[in-house]
Amino acid sequence: MKRGLLGAALLLSAAMTLAAEPVKVGALVTGMIEAMPVKAGDVVKRGALLFRVDMAMWKARRAELAAQVALRKAQLEDAQRDLAEQQDLYDRTVLATRALQRSQTRVAIAKAQLQAAQAALQAHQAWKRYYEVRAPFKARVKAIQTPAGSTVYRENTPVMLLEPAS
């Protein structure tokens, strides 16, 4: 057997062995479990919604980050207008080189701050998918350890146990 195939066979065997054990399912985010459409004993398909964590704090933070992006855009536009004025004065030899350079630096800083704000918003958006936890495989819900209405603290709170279903 080729080395790659042997490794793949070993990984598949290990995965099948691990899949036979109950799997603890939890959330990667903190919040209150607002919905849990399953109960112990239910058989769920792969991808079925197991529970949803309240997104109020996520939405508030998203609004805050979006406001930061808007603020940084306005600051950049202001810095660009100032630079255009400074460039005009410099071209007419009314302004010293240092004043023009300060305006150029303010534009560069404003661009960097806008990029940082956009990156923070994008990173926050990436967490949205973790507020809905779905079944990783066809399974039977063996036990609910943290019912709806309870608060989960990231991965430190197992919510339910799943076992493979045929």
Image: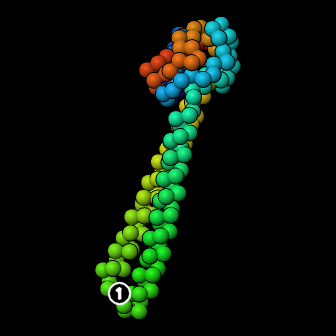
Left or right? Give the position of 49 relative to 93. right
Residue 160, by quadrant, is top right
Badge 1: residue crowd in 10 Å (few <14, some 14–19, many ≥20): some
Q: How is the image coloured?
A: rainbow
* Residue 135 visible somewhere in the drawing: no
Q: Position of residue 23 (x, y in %)?
A: 53, 14
Q: Residue at x 34, y 77 (%)?
A: 101
Q: Residue at x 53, y 43 (%)?
A: 62
Q: Position of residue 124 (x, y in %)?
A: 50, 42
**Where does the C terminus fall, quadrant-wise?**
top right
Q: Residue at x 36, y 70 (%)?
A: 105
Q: Residue at x 48, y 75 (%)?
A: 81
Q: Position of residue 47 (x, y in %)?
A: 66, 25
Which one is nearer the viewer's eye here, 69 or 1?
69
Above or below 33: residue 66: below
Q: Position of residue 102 (x, y in %)?
A: 34, 74
Which one is nearer the viewer's eye here, 146 or 137?
146
* Residue 33 visible somewhere in the drawing: yes
What SS does tag 1 mark?
loop
**How many labels sit on residues?**
1
Left or right? Give the position of 34 relative to 29. right
Q: Which residue is mark 1?
A: 95
Left or right? Give the position of 160 relative to 110. right
Above or below 84: residue 164: above
Please name the amino acid that badge 1 sits on.
Leu
Which one is nearer the viewer's eye here, 54 or 21?
54
